[in-house]
C-alpha cells in the first residue's frame, strides 16, 4: 500500500517537472576485433534516456543491443564517445565508484541467467546486497521477500541447476531487482518464459516503472513493447528508429503508439493520464518504415491476449 | 562502510568446502611444512631448556670459568670440533687457588678432561672421557654415588668413580666396585658408581654416565704432571652475590694471566649459552631446510587458487556485475588462500607436536611447549597465505566483467 501511494506521489511530482535526464550517449562507439576484422558493434550511437522511461530495444541478432546494454550497465567500456550517467561522464568515475553504482543503482538481468551454481537460489538473489554492505540476515530476508513476489519461495534452497529455465530466469530477475535499483537493464528478461510467467515478470517491471524507475529492456518479443514507453529499433550498431508510446495505466489493453513526429499533438491530447511525456524528438531516426510493422504487430497481439490476465496491481497503480 | 570480512570468510569457507578433496591436499603442503618446523622448534626448545634447567636446578649460584673468550660466531660451529678442544687451556692451578680466596665462594672444582682408552683384564673402551677433579665436583654438579662413594680427600690417588653406562660397557655389570682398569699404564680401582644422570647435554659438555672420575693429581700424572684445566666450576654462598664474585674472580685471574683476559667467567643462563648457541645454529639450518617444504606448500596454494580463479571466472563476472569492486574480489580470493594456509598451519602445528612427542619417547628430553612456537607457526602460515594468495587474487580482481561472463562451462 505504501508502495502504491508512493508511486502516485511520484507521478504527481513528475507531472509538473521537466523530466530528468538519466542517461545520455554521445556518438558512442564500441569496436570489436582489430585491423581487417574490426567491426563496430555500436556505431556512433546518440541516445537520451529520461528518468522513468521504459525502453524496449529491438533488433536482429548482432545489432549491438547486448553491447549497448553492457555499456549502459558499466560492464564494458566504449572505444569512443561519451556516456553520461546522471550528467556525469562515466569515464571520470573511478572503478570503485562504478562498482558502487552497479551495486546500488543498476540492476542487470542477463540473457543467460548468470546464476552461481554453487549457491542456493536465496543466496544468489541476496548476492548484490552483500556489496551494498547489508548484514547476512537482512540480505536473506530481502531476498526471500522478492522471491515470494516471483512465486519462488518454495525453491529458496534449491540450487539454480535444479530449476527449470523459466524459474532460473525469474531468479535472475529477482536478483536484479533485490537492491531496488533505479535503472533496470534487462537482456531478454522473458526470453525463456512461458506467457504466464512472462506476464508476472512484465507486471513486476511495469510496477517498478510506475514507481519512477528507468527500465531498459532488450527483447525479441514485439508483444512486450506494449509495456514500454519507448521502443528503439537497432540495426548494425545504429539506432534505426525511436518511437515513444503513450501508456495508459488505467487500461492495459490499449497502449497507444505515437510516431515521434506526431508526438506534440498527441501529447497535448492525452495529457491527463499519460505518464511518459517526451520533450524532444530523438535525433537519429533513419527508417521510419521500419517502425510501422512493429506497431501493427503490437496492436494485434495485444488484442489476442485474454483480458483476464491483467493483474490487479496494474489497476491499483492508476492515478485517480 | 562495513567491512565484509565475515561475508568473505563465509564465502571462502564454502568455496573451499565445495572442493573438499582439493582443498585438503592443498592444505597438506602447508601442514607438512609447518609440522616439520614445529617439530624442530619444539625439540630444539626442549634440548635448550635441558641445559637451562640444569643450571636452575643447581640453585642458580653456579659460576663457570672457561679458557678463551666465548664468542657466539657461527664459524666455531661450522667446524665439527671446535678449535679450543685442541688448544692448550689458559687456566692453571694457580687460578683455582685465586678463586678459592675470593670471599663468598663456597666451593671450587676444576675439570680436567682427557680422552683415553680404558683397559680391563678382558675388555677395553676407546675414547672414554677421564675427568680429573677435586671432591667438590660432587656437590657443585649434584653428582651422587649409586654404589660406593665419590672420591674425597681421604681416598687414594689411584681410585676412580665411574659412570653407570661405562661400568656396564667395561665389566658387563652395574656393580664393579673393587675392580680395576688401567689408563696409560696406571691402574685405578673403582670405589664408586655414579647414579645415572641421563643428560649427555649439559654445561660441562661431559656425559657423566660414560666418564671415569679420578683425582686431579692422578690426572696430572697421566699428563706428564701438567694440569690441563678445561673448566673451573664454582658455587657461591649466595646467588645474589654472583655478579660481585664474578667481577672479583675476573680481576684476580687477570692479574694471574699478566693482565690478559684469556678466560671467560659466566653465571646464570650464560653458562648454557655455548650449548644453546650451537643448537640455535643447528636449528636455524634445519628450519631453513624445512622452510623449503613450506614454500612448496605455498606454491601449491597459489597453483590451486589460479585454477580456482580460472574455473570461477564466470562467478567473478557475475559478482562484478552485481556490484563487487576489484578490491572485494581480491579479498575474497585472498581469504581463501589465508583460510587454506591458516587451517593447514594449525593442523601442522598439532601434527608437529604429535611427531615431536613421538620422537621424544626415544630421547632423554621432552619437547618444549611454548608460545613462541605457536606464534612462529601462525606467522609462517599467515605469511605463506598472504604471499602466495596475492597473485591469484590480483588475477581474479583484474578480470574483465563482460569477458568473464562470456565464458561458458
Image (cartoon, coloured by chain):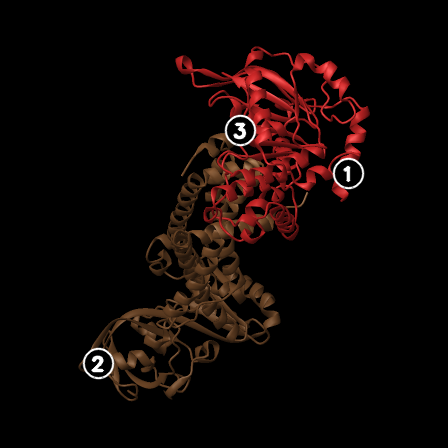
Q: Which mark is residue A6?
A: 1
Q: Which mark is residue A221?
A: 3
B230 with respect to A9 (left or right):
left
| Residue B145: percent from left, percent from top | 39, 85
Q: Are marks 2 and 3 in contact (CB under 8 Å)?
A: no
Q: Chain of mark 2?
A: B
State the residue lying farthest toward the top: A286
Marks 1/3: CA distance? Answer: 31 Å
Above or below, A290 relative to B404: above
Label 2 crowd bin: few (<14), some (14–19), many (20+), radius 10 Å: some
Secondary structure under tag 2 reads: loop
Q: Chain of mark 3?
A: A
Above or below, A194 relative to A74: below
Query: What residue lies at 33% left-to-right and 70% top-to-bottom?
Result: B225
B122 with respect to A305 (left or right):
left
Quarter-of-image position of residue B43: bottom left
| Residue A70: percent from left, percent from top | 55, 27
Chain drawn red in the picture:
A
Query: What residue lies at 40% left-to-right and 42% top-to-bottom?
Result: B307
Amino acid at each position: 500500500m505504501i508502495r502504491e501511494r508512493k508511486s502516485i506521489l511520484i507521478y504527481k511530482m513528475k507531472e509538473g517537472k521537466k523530466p530528468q535526464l538519466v542517461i545520455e550517449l554521445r556518438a558512442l562507439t564500441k569496436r570489436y576485433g582489430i585491423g581487417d576484422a574490426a567491426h563496430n558493434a555500436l556505431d556512433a550511437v546518440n541516445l537520451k534516456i529520461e528518468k522513468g522511461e521504459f525502453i524496449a530495444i529491438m533488433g536482429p541478432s548482432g545489432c549491438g543491443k547486448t553491447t549497448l546494454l553492457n555499456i549502459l550497465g558499466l560492464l564494458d567500456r566504449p572505444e569512443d564517445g561519451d556516456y553520461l550517467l546522471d550528467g556525469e561522464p562515466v569515464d571520470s568515475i573511478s572503478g570503485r565508484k562504478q562498482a558502487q553504482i552497479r551495486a546500488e543503482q543498476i540492476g542487470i538481468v542477463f540473457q543467460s541467467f548468470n546464476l552461481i551454481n554453487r549457491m542456493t537460489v536465496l543466496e544468489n538473489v541476496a548476492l548484490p546486497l552483500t556489496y551494498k554492505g547489508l548484514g547476512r540476515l537482512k540480505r536473506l530476508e530481502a531476498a526471500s521477500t522478492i522471491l515470494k513476489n516471483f512465486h519462488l519461495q518454495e525453491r529458496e534452497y534449491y540450487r539454480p541447476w535444479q530449476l527449470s529455465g523459466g524459474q532460473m530466469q525469474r531468479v535472475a530477475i529477482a536478483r536484479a531487482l533485490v537492491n531496488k535499483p533505479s535503472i533496470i537493464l534487462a537482456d531478454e528478461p522473458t526470453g525463456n518464459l512461458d506467457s504466464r510467467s512472462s506476464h508476472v515478470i512484465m507486471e513486476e517491471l511495469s510496477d517498478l516503472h510506475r514507481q519512477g524507475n528507468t527500465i531498459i529492456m532488450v527483447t525479441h518479443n514485439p508483444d512486450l513493447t506494449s509495456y514500454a514507453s519507448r521502443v528503439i529499433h537497432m540495426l548494425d550498431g545504429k539506432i534505426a528508429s525511436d518511437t515513444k508510446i503513450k501508456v495508459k495505466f488505467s487500461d492495459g489493453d490499449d497502449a497507444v503508439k505515437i510516431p515521434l513526429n506526431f508526438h506534440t499533438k498527441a501529447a497535448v491530447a492525452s495529457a491527463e493520464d499519460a505518464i511518459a511525456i517526451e520533450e524532444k524528438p530523438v535525433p537519429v531516426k533513419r527508417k521510419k518504415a521500419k517502425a510501422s510493422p512493429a506497431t501493427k504487430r503490437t496492436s494485434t497481439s495485444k488484442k489476442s491476449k485474454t483480458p483476464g490476465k491483467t493483474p490487479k496491481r496494474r489497476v491499483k497503480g492508476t492515478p485517480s | 562502510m562495513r567491512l565484509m570480512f565475515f561475508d568473505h570468510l563465509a564465502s571462502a569457507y564454502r568455496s573451499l568446502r565445495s572442493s573438499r578433496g582439493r582443498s585438503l591436499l592443498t592444505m597438506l603442503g602447508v601442514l607438512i611444512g609447518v609440522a616439520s618446523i614445529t617439530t624442530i622448534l619444539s625439540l630444539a626448545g626442549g634440548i635448550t631448556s635441558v641445559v637451562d634447567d640444569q643450571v636452575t636446578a643447581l640453585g642458580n649460584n653456579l659460576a663457570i670459568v672457561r679458557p678463551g673468550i666465548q664468542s657466539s660466531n657461527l664459524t666455531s660451529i661450522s667446524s665439527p670440533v671446535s678449535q679450543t678442544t685442541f688448544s692448550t687451556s689458559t687456566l692453571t692451578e694457580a687460578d683455582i687457588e685465586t678463586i678459592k680466596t675470593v670471599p663468598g665462594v663456597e666451593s671450587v672444582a676444576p675439570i680436567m678432561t682427557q680422552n683415553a682408552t680404558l683397559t680391563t683384564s678382558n675388555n677395553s673402551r676407546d675414547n672414554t672421557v677421564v675427568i680429573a677433579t677435586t671432591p667438590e665436583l660432587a656437590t657443585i654438579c649434584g653428582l651422587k654415588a649409586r654404589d660406593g662413594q665419590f672420591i674425597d680427600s681421604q681416598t687414594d690417588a689411584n681410585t676412580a668413580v665411574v659412570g653407570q653406562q661405562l661400568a656396564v660397557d667395561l665389566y658387563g655389570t652395574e656393580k664393579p666396585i673393587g675392580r680395576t682398569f688401567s689408563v696409560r699404564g696406571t691402574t685405578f680401582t673403582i670405589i664408586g658408581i655414579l647414579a645415572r644422570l641421563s643428560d649427555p647435554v649439559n654445561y660441562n659438555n661431559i656425559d657423566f654416565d660414560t666418564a671415569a672420575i679420578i683425582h686431579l693429581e692422578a690426572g696430572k700424572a697421566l699428563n706428564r704432571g701438567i694440569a690441563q684445566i678445561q673448566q673451573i666450576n664454582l658455587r657461591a654462598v649466595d646467588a645474589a652475590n654472583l655478579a660481585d664474585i664474578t667481577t672479583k674472580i675476573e680481576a684476580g685471574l687477570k692479574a694471574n694471566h699478566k693482565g690478559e683476559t684469556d678466560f671467560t667467567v659466566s653465571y646464570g643462563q650464560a653458562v648454557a649459552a655455548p650449548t644453546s648457541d650451537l643448537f640455535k645454529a643447528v636449528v636455524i639450518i634445519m628450519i631453513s631446510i624445512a622452510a623449503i617444504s613450506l614454500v612448496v606448500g605455498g606454491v601449491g596454494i597459489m597453483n590451486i587458487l589460479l585454477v580456482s580463479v580460472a574455473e570461477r571466472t564466470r562467478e567473478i563476472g557475475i559478482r562484478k556485475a552485481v556490484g563487487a569492486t576489484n578490491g572485494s574480489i581480491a579479498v575474497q580470493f585472498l581469504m581463501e588462500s589465508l583460510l587454506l594456509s591458516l587451517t593447514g598451519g594449525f593442523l601442522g602445528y598439532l601434527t608437529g607436536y604429535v611427531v615431536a612427542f613421538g620422537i621424544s619417547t626415544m630421547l632423554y628430553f621432552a619437547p618444549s611447549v611454548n608460545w613462541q612456537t605457536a606464534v612462529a607457526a601462525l606467522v609462517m602460515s599467515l605469511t605463506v597465505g598472504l604471499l602466495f594468495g596475492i597473485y591469484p587474487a590480483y588475477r581474479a580482481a583484474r578480470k574483465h566483467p563482460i569477458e568473464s561472463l562470456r565464458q561458458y562451462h
